[in-house]
Amino acid sequence: RAMVVFGQLVVGPPGAGKTTYCTGMQMLLSALKRPRTLVNLDPANDDLPYECDIDVRELVNVEDVMTELGLGPNGALLYAMEYIEVNLDWLIARIRTASKGVAMPYVLFDCPGQVELYTHHDVMTNVTQQLVKALDLRLVAVHLVDSTLCVDVHRYISAVLLSLAAMMQMELPHINVLSKIDMVMDHTDDLTFRLDYYAGVQDLSHLLRTLSTNNHPLSQKFGEFNRLLAELIEDYGLVSFEPLDIQDKECAMRVLSRCDTANGHIMNAEKIEDPSDPVSGVRLFQTAMSDAGEPLEDYLERYEERYQARKAEESDQEEDA
């Protein structure tokens, strides 16, 4: 029987927390005793906080491209990604080697942050589609957005639009994640609405009403532009966000369970895992289904309680030190 490989393609703009997410998810998968392979798919990332199993910088490095071809950072990155696409057999061979003898291989891809790779160019789509075909790879795209963008209406709408564009371009099962929610917990007064409103991408007309308007023609044009963008987002009705604090186990488990459902890992986990094992994928799925009907507002309230308890514990430890 041919080997089936599962995985996550971790994407998002610079600063969204992709590398931190991969680090935390790697630790979670280890705790769950799930074999995993971590792939650095960013030829420009020269400061990895984790030890990756496969590093495309061994194949092509952006700094070398800049030096040899005289290209700028963006041009060099695009060249490097196209080079990876042409030489994809190198990556496929290493994933096969890392997955050899593993019952259910699971691969994390830490991807570049330049958004044009997902919105204006086909290189990432081509790479992922070839990987899917060559490895029988069941992949879910995990698109991260920094939750601190919620404090600004324009940046939030732009982030939602970017998430929608990435979903349409990548042509993969897709999960949007609102990362770093711990960073807004101490600044909720800066939010116009509760965090669950932003995570659910609820009626954006309420958000647009909060924008200051005047009679200046340019202001009116921008107001109309934002209204049309909001209508476009709502017409598709595809975007919502899973809130994530990667340091919070329940948050991380919830996101992983969504990924396992989207890429089909859970359906195969039932065949090889013992459901009585508390760290089995089956138990993870059952837990996810039990909270699937929980309103996001209630879930975030429970998270805030855990966050405040964690902050108090950290404060006590600092005082003891």
Image: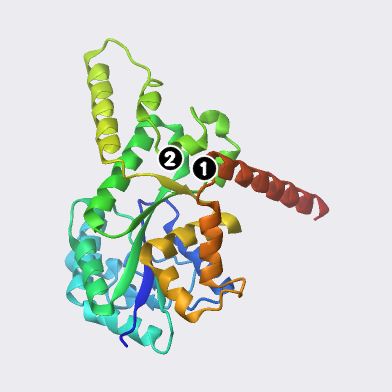
Question: Would you identify the image quadrant in which residue 102 lies?
Answer: bottom left
Q: Please give left or right for residue 310 compared with residue 300 in the image.
A: right
Residue at horizontal 32 percent and vertical 74 percent from the top? 56
Residue 262 image point, x, y percent: 38, 61
**Mark 1 surroundings within 10 Å by alpha-carbon count, few (fewer than 14), some (14 through 19), many (20 or more):** some
Label 2 SS:
helix
Residue 46 image point, x, y percent: 39, 66
Residue 296 image label: 1
Residue at horizontal 29 percent and vertical 46 percent from the top? 164
Residue at horizontal 31 percent and vertical 45 percent from the top? 238
Give the amino acid type for the residue marked by disc 1 in the picture.
Leu
Label 1 SS:
helix
Image vertical order of residue 228 relative to residue 79, above or below: above
Q: Please give left or right for residue 136 compared with residue 242 in the image.
A: left
**Mark 2 surroundings within 10 Å by alpha-carbon count, few (fewer than 14), some (14 through 19), many (20 or more):** some
Residue 282 image point, x, y percent: 52, 70
Question: Would you identify the image quadrant in which residue 222 lies?
Answer: top left
Residue contact at pointers 1 and 2, CB within 8 angstroms: yes
Q: Please give left or right for residue 165 compared with residue 265 in the image.
A: left
Where does the C terminus fall, quadrant-wise? bottom right
Residue 60 image point, x, y percent: 27, 73
| Residue 95 in view of the camera | yes
Give the amino acid type for the residue marked by disc 2 in the picture.
Gly
Image vertical order of residue 202 relative to residue 238, above or below: above
Q: How many marks?
A: 2
Q: Residue furthest top?
A: 215
Q: Residue beneath label 2, please?
A: 200
Q: Please give left or right for residue 276 compared with residue 111 in the image.
A: right
| Residue 110 in view of the camera | no
Mark pair 1, 2: CA separation: 8 Å
Residue at horizontal 17 percent and vertical 67 percent from the top? 69
